[in-house]
Image (cartoon, grey):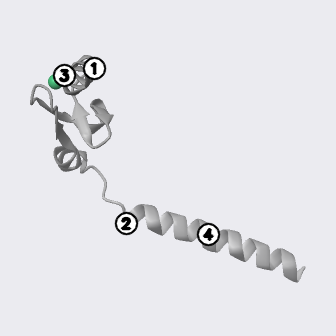
Amino acid sequence: MGRLLFLIAVIVIVYWLLKSYRKQLPKGDTASMQAEDMVRCVHCGVHLPKRESIQAGDKFYCSEEHRRMHAGKSE
Ligand SMILES: [Zn+2]
């Protein structure tokens, strides 16, 4: 019985921690987050969101085509 109560207490504490943790996360602030995540295509210089870009090492590209073109130029 004691163990069961302990288990329930642990579950409640974990649930409560997750709930309060989620509350701390900023909500509805995606616009500023996207602005911070802008990257520049090293081939043509266009700016685009990081998640829409193609990354190769520490470089970003606007498309797979530009990644290939840039790689072909330097090699
Ligand atoms: Zn490009």
- Mark nearer the N terminus (1 vs 4): 4
Task: Give the Cα distance between marks 2 and 1.
Answer: 42 Å
Quadrant of the rendering where the N terminus is positioned = bottom right
Q: Are marks 3 and 4 in contact (CB under 8 Å)?
A: no
Per the image, label 4 sits on a secondary structure element best described as helix
- Residue flagged by tag 4: what amino acid is it? Val
Compared across the picture, whether 67 is left or right of 23 comes to left
**Would you name the residue on which mark 3 appears?**
73
Residue 9 lies in quadrant: bottom right
**How far across and how far down the image is residue 56, in percent?**
32, 35
- Residue flagged by tag 1: what amino acid is it? Arg
Q: Which mark identifies residue 24?
A: 2
**How far across and how far down the image is residue 25, in percent?**
36, 61
Quadrant of the rendering where the C terminus is positioned = top left
Per the image, label 2 sits on a secondary structure element best described as helix
**Would you name the residue on which mark 1 appears?**
68
Task: Give the Cα distance between marks 4 and 2.
Answer: 16 Å
As drawn, which residue projects farthest toward the bottom?
2
Of circles 3 and 4, which is in front? Answer: 3
- Mark nearer the N terminus (3 vs 1): 1
Task: Give the Cα distance between marks 3 and 4.
Answer: 53 Å
**Would you name the residue on which mark 4 appears?**
14
Of circles 1 and 4, which is in front? Answer: 1
Q: Is residue 72 above or below residue 32?
A: above
- Mark nearer the N terminus (2 vs 1): 2
Front-most of residues 20 and 32: 32
Residue in view at x 61 percent, y 69 percent:
14
